[in-house]
Image (spheres, rainbow, N blue to C red):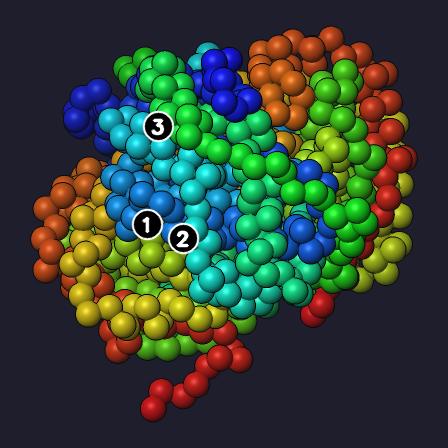
Amino acid sequence: MLALASVQANPVTDVIAPGAKVVAVDAIVRLPALGAREYAAAKVMAETMADEVDGYSQGDMRDMGARAGESLKITLMPDHIRIEFGALPAEADTAISYVGHILKNSRFPEDSIAKAEAEIPFRKKSLWATAIQPVKFDFRRVRREDVLDMYHRICRPENVWLCVGGPIDARDAENAWSAVLADWTVTKPPRLPANPTPLGEASDVPGRETMVELRGSSFPGNDPAMPTKLLALIGLGCGKGAAMFQTLRETEGWSYRQEAFLWPTPEGFEPRLIMASGDKTAPDDLAKGMRDQLILAVKNWDASDLARAEGMAQGIFERGFAMSPLYFNSSWPISGSLEDETFLAGYWTMKTGSPWNASRMLGEMALVSLSDFKDAAMEILTDSKAHVLPARG
Amino acid sequence: MLAAQDQPPRLRTVLDNGAIVLVEPMPQERVVSVQLFASARYVPETEATHGFRHLIEHLLAVGDGGLDKRLETQACFLRASTLRDAMQIELTVGPTQLQLALDTLAGFLHRPTFTQAQIDKELRVMRDELAMRDDSLLLASAAWDAAYGDRGLDPLGTFDSMYRATPEKLEETYDRQFAPEGLVIAIAGPVDMDKATAMASRILVPLSKSHFSVAQGDRVGKPGRSQADAFGECRGAIVPGFDTPQTAAALSAALAIGSELPGCFVIYTPTTQNGLVLVGRTDSTSGLGFYVDGLANGNSLYRRGQSLAREWVQRQLRTASADADIRGLLLCQGAANRPELMIDQINAMSKEEFNAGIEAFKSGKTVWCLPWHQFRPIP
């Protein structure tokens, strides 16, 4: 833990990777549950917070990132904002400092905010992106003051998890972050609105494919059944031997693409199963058919299905297969890249109170019995609610 | 067997039948990537066979229906894709599972028997795949169409053409696709170089060289404008082969342009033929064209573009999967091809060449792709 008298801060998470050529710097800012208008303000904030930062030229920082083949990315998810930057090892301190200054010294120029508010509502999202993130922002009456209010409310040392990965010296990273924290003055946090307008969701998707979703009940990050639930999700929808692929695609021919994943919410996580279908069956009947067929498949699961899920979990968490059910990225699955492993190290701590440990997770999964595996999958399916987004055409 | 030492520590071996084995030990990697590339040199996409290779890829990957489950139980994964220049099948396995990967790949080298029922069933799923192509792919496809016409057909195919596939037609396509002299097995990961080379060679050596000949010369691109059934905007620089100064400059320019406009995508698949370097955006329909045409020169972006392009290539050499991918793809187009040739050109790129790369994206020289609703006749 950093010893700081002036501010309460989370410890820096380090992912030491001596052979890496670049240093990944991630700052994760925790978001509370937000209403439609507040979430829109957070979106504008994420889009504009790096446009003008005291002490740093955007062009210089782009050049610094480019030397490592990187660029700054700031993305918004339901439970966090991620500021992601990469630099050559020799420039790691500057990268950490830059990320810190984005968090505490952004100027939010009027024209940047006006531009973002003019553009964002008209941006197109793909079919799959709309289905996974169906949220509708409410940009009406979002002013610069609202964005600043959000910035001061959430960008606070106690609300930020900094993770640094690569060929780093952990002490150097901590020192660089300490320098950021040293003059980070925080004011009393602005109050949350008492009754925020709930987030709206899209009612259809572009294109000719209907999106059919079974959305399970959410559970907290520190749920002791996490390994069983994660394994069940892998059994349902990760890999080509999974129930969704085998049933919905190979047997029924309803869908080319279908995925099961864990989705972050401010309260914890939500298991979600989505398929895209061009089938002519009425969408609600398709959702019912999807649930019925998957329940039937789970009833028929045997030891070979448990073994496949365990093997797939090993492939994902130990070997870095790009099939993870952990959709914590704005581009969804966590990959085996240094950038994502660095992010996950800090994010899992924020969500569960413990650092991510793939070996421990796999060890706990290996203890899951077939009946628990089937029960967990059945619970996801039977508790789920159907969400259908018809094709817009 | 003609053994040729590439740069240490990797070994490229050209077999008597023309097939190639490339092994690159990467001891720090957690997995071994074993990739089979089958060159498309004898089976270019035509209106008559458009998408047949993609259909074959699907039918092969399905296998006996239990292949994926068997592999995934052992923490292994199979992935297949169809590219303009090749078909690619990748097995990702653990350090002690190389033989499993090679045995699986060997199964794809025996021509399967296709049935019409299998074809019809797979087409039902592929209709969904085609309907789900995202905007960047649709824009890229339209750009290729505008630049190269029927020599730039999207390897994914169309439903109308694939609907005409029969078992006999697919078997003929398979024979051309998997002609031994167009095969490459690329292995990267924690493996012993000599042992892995010998193991991979064993499955390729028995194959007899084919009698097919290359049907077409290099494609010739032309600038222009086209419409896509997609949202966004895309510009493509017409470039010669992957190892040329023009391609290095266009790639550097595209990445530099992308760094100035958040949300941009850059697409380039290394090829020995004339191709396209594409830069576009799909979240908005404005900004890219105005920005590019408004650039007086690219002087201020030169160093950044060079850094980004160099890193773009080098990143593909840092993981087992990406390394086997780019090396295999290049080797199946010619035994002397190496990604390092791209890095050499990027390092040697002058500011003038970079500016020419920027110019290649400007109106009049570029392939410019817009959505239908934004298309205006050229004045």
Asked if badge 3 and badge 2 are on a common chain, one would say yes
At a point 12% along the width and 50% down the height, the residue shown is: B349
Q: Amino acid at mark 3?
A: Val
Which percent across, then down, holds residue B53? Answer: 48, 52
The residue under label 1 is: A58
Distance between the alpha carbons at the discs numbered 3 and 2: 22 Å
Identified by mark 1, the residue type is Gln
Residue under pointer 2: A51
Is A50 left or right of B2, judged from the image as shown? right
> Please, is residue A142 above or below residue A88 in the view?
below
Name above or below for residue B185 compared with residue A62: above
Q: Give me the chain letter of mark 3.
A: A
Question: CB of mark 1 within 8 Å of CB of mark 2?
Answer: yes
Determine whether the residue tagged by mark 1 lies in a helix, strand or loop: helix
Toward the viewer: A246 or B379? B379
Residue type (three-letter) at the residue carrying disc 2 = Asp
**Res A245 → quadrant:** top right
Q: Label 3 to label 1, Cα distance in Å?
A: 19 Å
Circle 3 is placed at which residue position? A23
